[in-house]
Amino acid sequence: PVPVYSMPNTTVPCQYRTGKTLGSGTYAIVKEAIHIKTGKYYACKVINKKLMEGREHMVRNEIAVLKRISSGNPNIVTLHDYFETSHNLYLCFDLCTGGELFDRICAKGNYYEADAAALVRTILTAVSYIHAAGIVHRDLKPENLLFRTPAEDADIMIADFGLSRIMEEEKLSLLTEICGTPGYMAPEIFMKTGHSKPVDVWAMGVVTYFLLAGYTPFDRDTPKAEMEAIIAGDYKCIRARKYWANVSEEARDFVRACLTIDPERRPTRRGWLAATTPHFVPDPDSGSP
Ligand code: ADP
Ligand code: MG
Protein backbone atom coordinates (compact mmCIF):
# COMPACT_ATOMS: atom_id res chain seq x y z
CA PRO A 1 0.00 0.00 0.00
CA VAL A 2 1.05 3.58 -0.64
CA PRO A 3 1.97 5.23 2.67
CA VAL A 4 -0.24 8.13 3.73
CA TYR A 5 2.64 10.53 3.64
CA SER A 6 4.34 9.04 0.60
CA MET A 7 7.57 9.09 2.50
CA PRO A 8 10.43 7.26 0.94
CA ASN A 9 11.23 4.39 3.23
CA THR A 10 14.92 5.03 2.93
CA THR A 11 15.50 4.11 6.52
CA VAL A 12 13.74 1.64 8.69
CA PRO A 13 12.99 2.93 12.17
CA CYS A 14 14.87 0.10 13.84
CA GLN A 15 18.07 1.62 12.53
CA TYR A 16 17.66 4.08 15.39
CA ARG A 17 17.24 3.56 19.09
CA THR A 18 15.39 6.33 20.87
CA GLY A 19 16.44 7.64 24.25
CA LYS A 20 15.41 10.45 26.56
CA THR A 21 12.78 13.02 25.67
CA LEU A 22 14.23 16.36 24.63
CA GLY A 23 11.06 18.36 24.45
CA SER A 24 7.49 18.38 23.30
CA GLY A 25 5.14 20.73 21.55
CA THR A 26 1.62 20.74 20.20
CA TYR A 27 1.75 17.64 18.00
CA ALA A 28 5.05 16.01 18.66
CA ILE A 29 7.43 14.54 21.17
CA VAL A 30 11.10 14.97 20.36
CA LYS A 31 13.45 12.26 21.53
CA GLU A 32 17.15 11.75 21.42
CA ALA A 33 17.92 8.95 18.96
CA ILE A 34 21.08 7.07 18.19
CA HIS A 35 21.74 5.74 14.71
CA ILE A 36 22.85 2.24 15.60
CA LYS A 37 25.18 1.67 12.66
CA THR A 38 27.13 4.92 12.99
CA GLY A 39 26.63 5.67 16.68
CA LYS A 40 25.62 9.22 15.73
CA TYR A 41 23.05 11.07 17.80
CA TYR A 42 20.01 12.82 16.36
CA ALA A 43 16.84 14.49 17.56
CA CYS A 44 13.83 12.52 16.43
CA LYS A 45 10.46 14.27 16.21
CA VAL A 46 7.81 11.61 16.75
CA ILE A 47 4.39 12.56 15.46
CA ASN A 48 1.42 10.37 16.32
CA LYS A 49 -0.59 9.67 13.16
CA LYS A 50 -3.88 9.42 15.03
CA LEU A 51 -3.35 12.86 16.59
CA MET A 52 -2.53 14.30 13.18
CA GLU A 53 -5.52 12.78 11.43
CA GLY A 54 -6.96 15.34 9.03
CA ARG A 55 -3.84 17.50 9.38
CA GLU A 56 -1.48 15.26 7.45
CA HIS A 57 -0.73 18.14 5.09
CA MET A 58 1.01 19.94 7.98
CA VAL A 59 3.73 17.32 8.20
CA ARG A 60 4.09 17.13 4.44
CA ASN A 61 4.44 20.91 4.44
CA GLU A 62 7.01 20.85 7.25
CA ILE A 63 9.14 18.38 5.30
CA ALA A 64 8.82 20.34 2.06
CA VAL A 65 9.88 23.56 3.78
CA LEU A 66 12.82 21.94 5.55
CA LYS A 67 14.03 20.35 2.33
CA ARG A 68 13.92 23.74 0.69
CA ILE A 69 15.86 25.67 3.30
CA SER A 70 17.60 23.32 5.72
CA SER A 71 21.00 23.41 4.10
CA GLY A 72 20.98 27.03 2.99
CA ASN A 73 21.66 28.74 6.30
CA PRO A 74 23.83 27.64 9.24
CA ASN A 75 21.22 28.69 11.82
CA ILE A 76 18.32 26.54 10.66
CA VAL A 77 17.94 22.99 11.98
CA THR A 78 18.82 20.35 9.40
CA LEU A 79 16.39 17.60 8.55
CA HIS A 80 18.52 14.51 8.26
CA ASP A 81 16.00 11.76 7.54
CA TYR A 82 12.30 10.92 7.78
CA PHE A 83 10.21 7.78 7.76
CA GLU A 84 7.01 6.31 9.12
CA THR A 85 5.70 3.26 10.91
CA SER A 86 2.08 2.22 11.18
CA HIS A 87 1.53 4.51 14.19
CA ASN A 88 4.04 7.30 13.93
CA LEU A 89 5.90 9.66 11.65
CA TYR A 90 9.52 10.36 12.40
CA LEU A 91 11.55 13.40 11.44
CA CYS A 92 15.24 13.11 12.31
CA PHE A 93 17.12 16.35 12.89
CA ASP A 94 20.66 17.16 13.79
CA LEU A 95 20.72 17.17 17.57
CA CYS A 96 20.83 20.48 19.38
CA THR A 97 22.20 19.71 22.83
CA GLY A 98 22.09 23.25 24.22
CA GLY A 99 18.39 23.40 24.98
CA GLU A 100 15.81 26.08 24.24
CA LEU A 101 16.43 29.82 24.35
CA PHE A 102 13.37 29.89 26.60
CA ASP A 103 15.18 28.03 29.38
CA ARG A 104 18.28 30.20 29.09
CA ILE A 105 16.25 33.40 29.45
CA CYS A 106 14.49 31.94 32.49
CA ALA A 107 17.79 30.85 34.04
CA LYS A 108 19.41 34.26 33.50
CA GLY A 109 16.41 36.44 34.28
CA ASN A 110 17.28 38.50 31.23
CA TYR A 111 20.13 38.96 28.75
CA TYR A 112 22.72 41.71 28.65
CA GLU A 113 21.92 43.94 25.72
CA ALA A 114 25.13 43.12 23.82
CA ASP A 115 24.45 39.39 24.07
CA ALA A 116 20.79 39.86 23.13
CA ALA A 117 21.81 41.96 20.10
CA ALA A 118 24.20 39.27 18.88
CA LEU A 119 21.52 36.58 19.16
CA VAL A 120 18.82 38.69 17.52
CA ARG A 121 21.17 39.63 14.70
CA THR A 122 21.91 35.95 13.98
CA ILE A 123 18.26 34.94 14.15
CA LEU A 124 17.19 37.82 11.90
CA THR A 125 19.81 36.92 9.33
CA ALA A 126 18.33 33.41 9.24
CA VAL A 127 14.78 34.81 9.12
CA SER A 128 15.87 37.04 6.28
CA TYR A 129 17.10 33.96 4.43
CA ILE A 130 13.83 32.12 5.13
CA HIS A 131 11.79 35.06 3.84
CA ALA A 132 13.93 35.40 0.73
CA ALA A 133 13.20 31.73 0.05
CA GLY A 134 9.50 32.55 0.13
CA ILE A 135 8.76 31.05 3.52
CA VAL A 136 7.03 32.56 6.52
CA HIS A 137 7.77 30.69 9.78
CA ARG A 138 4.77 31.81 11.86
CA ASP A 139 5.89 30.28 15.15
CA LEU A 140 9.07 32.10 16.14
CA LYS A 141 9.39 32.00 19.93
CA PRO A 142 12.09 31.06 22.45
CA GLU A 143 10.78 27.47 22.68
CA ASN A 144 11.54 27.03 18.98
CA LEU A 145 15.00 28.61 19.09
CA LEU A 146 17.57 26.02 20.12
CA PHE A 147 21.26 26.05 20.96
CA ARG A 148 23.47 23.68 19.05
CA THR A 149 25.67 22.91 22.09
CA PRO A 150 25.55 23.65 25.82
CA ALA A 151 28.29 26.31 25.42
CA GLU A 152 27.40 29.84 26.48
CA ASP A 153 28.26 31.14 23.00
CA ALA A 154 26.70 28.22 21.09
CA ASP A 155 25.09 28.80 17.69
CA ILE A 156 21.38 29.47 17.86
CA MET A 157 19.13 27.48 15.54
CA ILE A 158 15.63 28.12 14.23
CA ALA A 159 13.50 24.98 14.64
CA ASP A 160 9.87 23.89 14.23
CA PHE A 161 8.62 24.70 10.75
CA GLY A 162 5.32 22.97 11.57
CA LEU A 163 3.27 26.13 11.03
CA SER A 164 5.33 27.63 8.24
CA ARG A 165 3.99 28.43 4.82
CA ILE A 166 5.52 28.70 1.39
CA MET A 167 4.43 31.98 -0.20
CA GLU A 168 5.56 32.56 -3.72
CA GLU A 169 4.40 36.14 -3.89
CA GLU A 170 5.33 39.17 -1.86
CA LYS A 171 1.67 39.87 -1.21
CA LEU A 172 0.65 40.72 2.32
CA SER A 173 -2.77 39.26 2.63
CA LEU A 174 -2.62 35.63 1.70
CA LEU A 175 -2.98 33.76 4.94
CA THR A 176 -6.00 34.12 7.14
CA GLU A 177 -6.14 31.12 9.44
CA ILE A 178 -5.54 31.83 13.10
CA CYS A 179 -2.42 30.02 14.21
CA GLY A 180 0.68 30.42 16.30
CA THR A 181 1.32 30.91 19.99
CA PRO A 182 -0.89 33.69 21.38
CA GLY A 183 1.75 35.80 23.13
CA TYR A 184 3.85 35.98 19.95
CA MET A 185 1.04 36.41 17.42
CA ALA A 186 0.80 39.66 15.47
CA PRO A 187 -2.39 41.78 15.58
CA GLU A 188 -3.29 41.03 11.94
CA ILE A 189 -3.52 37.31 12.75
CA PHE A 190 -6.29 37.98 15.30
CA MET A 191 -7.90 40.53 12.98
CA LYS A 192 -8.00 37.96 10.15
CA THR A 193 -7.14 40.71 7.71
CA GLY A 194 -4.50 38.53 6.08
CA HIS A 195 -0.93 38.04 7.15
CA SER A 196 2.48 37.18 5.82
CA LYS A 197 6.19 37.67 6.52
CA PRO A 198 5.71 40.67 8.85
CA VAL A 199 4.28 38.30 11.48
CA ASP A 200 7.81 36.92 11.93
CA VAL A 201 9.16 40.42 12.50
CA TRP A 202 6.49 41.04 15.13
CA ALA A 203 7.38 37.75 16.84
CA MET A 204 11.04 38.78 16.84
CA GLY A 205 9.99 42.00 18.56
CA VAL A 206 8.35 39.93 21.30
CA VAL A 207 11.41 37.66 21.54
CA THR A 208 13.76 40.66 21.80
CA TYR A 209 11.54 42.27 24.42
CA PHE A 210 11.64 39.03 26.44
CA LEU A 211 15.44 38.76 26.08
CA LEU A 212 16.02 42.31 27.29
CA ALA A 213 13.40 42.59 30.01
CA GLY A 214 12.97 39.00 31.21
CA TYR A 215 9.19 39.14 30.81
CA THR A 216 6.90 39.09 27.79
CA PRO A 217 5.04 42.19 26.62
CA PHE A 218 1.47 40.97 26.28
CA ASP A 219 1.08 38.70 29.29
CA ARG A 220 -2.39 39.35 30.73
CA ASP A 221 -4.75 37.58 33.10
CA THR A 222 -7.02 36.17 30.39
CA PRO A 223 -6.56 35.16 26.74
CA LYS A 224 -9.11 37.82 25.79
CA ALA A 225 -7.19 40.59 27.57
CA GLU A 226 -4.00 39.35 25.95
CA MET A 227 -5.53 39.49 22.49
CA GLU A 228 -6.90 42.97 23.11
CA ALA A 229 -3.49 44.18 24.27
CA ILE A 230 -1.87 42.78 21.12
CA ILE A 231 -4.45 44.32 18.80
CA ALA A 232 -3.96 47.66 20.55
CA GLY A 233 -0.17 47.23 20.51
CA ASP A 234 -0.30 47.84 24.22
CA TYR A 235 2.95 46.36 25.48
CA LYS A 236 3.78 46.65 29.13
CA CYS A 237 5.77 49.70 30.10
CA ILE A 238 8.95 49.68 28.12
CA ARG A 239 9.96 52.54 30.38
CA ALA A 240 9.62 50.57 33.60
CA ARG A 241 12.86 51.61 35.26
CA LYS A 242 13.57 48.42 37.05
CA TYR A 243 13.72 46.25 33.95
CA TRP A 244 14.68 48.67 31.21
CA ALA A 245 17.21 50.88 32.99
CA ASN A 246 20.21 49.30 31.29
CA VAL A 247 18.61 49.03 27.86
CA SER A 248 19.64 51.59 25.25
CA GLU A 249 17.18 53.81 23.43
CA GLU A 250 18.23 52.08 20.21
CA ALA A 251 17.27 48.66 21.51
CA ARG A 252 13.91 50.04 22.64
CA ASP A 253 13.42 51.60 19.20
CA PHE A 254 14.15 48.26 17.62
CA VAL A 255 11.50 46.54 19.75
CA ARG A 256 9.00 49.33 19.07
CA ALA A 257 9.62 49.10 15.31
CA CYS A 258 9.00 45.34 15.32
CA LEU A 259 5.86 45.81 17.42
CA THR A 260 4.29 48.24 14.94
CA ILE A 261 0.60 47.43 14.61
CA ASP A 262 0.45 48.08 10.85
CA PRO A 263 2.33 45.16 9.22
CA GLU A 264 3.20 47.27 6.20
CA ARG A 265 5.06 49.71 8.39
CA ARG A 266 7.05 47.07 10.24
CA PRO A 267 10.72 46.73 9.27
CA THR A 268 11.25 44.38 6.35
CA ARG A 269 14.07 42.19 5.17
CA ARG A 270 15.52 44.92 3.00
CA GLY A 271 15.21 47.91 5.16
CA TRP A 272 15.22 45.90 8.37
CA LEU A 273 16.24 47.95 11.09
CA ALA A 274 18.93 49.67 9.11
CA ALA A 275 16.74 52.73 9.27
CA THR A 276 15.98 52.50 12.95
CA THR A 277 18.66 50.81 14.94
CA PRO A 278 21.92 50.25 13.10
CA HIS A 279 23.85 49.65 16.27
CA PHE A 280 21.45 47.29 17.88
CA VAL A 281 20.92 45.15 14.81
CA PRO A 282 22.78 46.10 11.65
CA ASP A 283 21.10 45.36 8.36
CA PRO A 284 21.81 41.69 7.60
CA ASP A 285 21.41 42.46 3.91
CA SER A 286 23.88 45.30 3.85
CA GLY A 287 26.48 44.78 1.22
CA SER A 288 24.02 43.06 -1.10
CA PRO A 289 21.46 44.86 -3.24
P1 ADP B 1 6.14 21.11 17.96
O1 ADP B 1 5.76 21.35 16.55
O2 ADP B 1 5.31 20.04 18.58
O3 ADP B 1 6.21 22.37 18.78
P2 ADP B 1 9.05 21.16 17.84
O4 ADP B 1 9.66 20.91 16.51
O5 ADP B 1 8.99 22.59 18.29
O6 ADP B 1 7.62 20.47 17.91
O7 ADP B 1 9.84 20.32 18.94
C1 ADP B 1 9.39 20.33 20.30
C2 ADP B 1 10.56 20.57 21.24
O8 ADP B 1 11.53 19.52 21.08
C3 ADP B 1 11.34 21.87 20.99
O9 ADP B 1 10.74 22.96 21.62
C4 ADP B 1 12.70 21.50 21.59
O10 ADP B 1 12.71 21.61 22.99
C5 ADP B 1 12.84 20.02 21.22
N1 ADP B 1 13.58 19.87 19.94
C6 ADP B 1 13.07 20.02 18.70
N2 ADP B 1 14.02 19.84 17.74
C7 ADP B 1 15.17 19.56 18.40
C8 ADP B 1 16.53 19.30 17.99
N3 ADP B 1 16.87 19.27 16.70
N4 ADP B 1 17.45 19.08 18.96
C9 ADP B 1 17.10 19.11 20.27
N5 ADP B 1 15.86 19.36 20.72
C10 ADP B 1 14.89 19.59 19.81
MG1 MG C 1 7.54 23.97 18.78
Image (cartoon, rainbow, N blue to C red):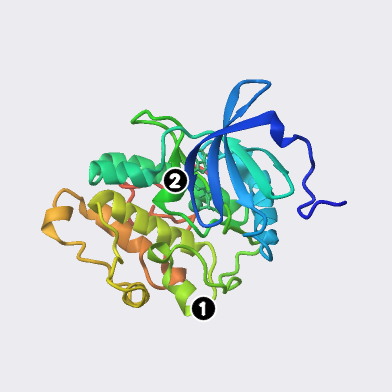
Q: Is residue 289 visible?
A: no
Q: Residue at the location (36% across, 31% down)?
A: 153
Circles 2 and 1 in contact, beta carbons < 8 Å: no
Q: Nearer the viewer, residue 116 or 169?
A: 116
Residue for badge 2: 145
Residue 244, image x, y percentages: 17, 54
Give residue 90's quadrant in the image: top right
Tag shown at residue 95: none
| Left or right of residue 93, residue 87 in this image | right
In what element is the residue under mark 1?
Answer: loop
Residue flagged by tag 1: what amino acid is it?
Lys
Give residue 57's quadrant in the image: bottom right
Q: CA distance from mark 2 to mark 1?
A: 26 Å
In what element is the residue under mark 2?
Answer: strand
In the current view of this chain or complex, which residue is farthest to the left? 241
Q: Residue at the location (54% across, 47% down)?
A: 29
Q: Residue at the location (38% across, 72% down)?
A: 261
Residue 224, image x, y percentages: 35, 77
Q: Residue at the location (33% across, 72% down)?
A: 226
Residue flagged by tag 2: what amino acid is it?
Leu
| Left or right of residue 42, residue 276 in this image | left
Q: Nearer the viewer, residue 181 or 210?
A: 181
Mark 1 is surrounded, within 10 Å at the Cα level, by few (under 14), some (14 to 19) or many (20 or more) other residues, namely few
Residue for badge 1: 192
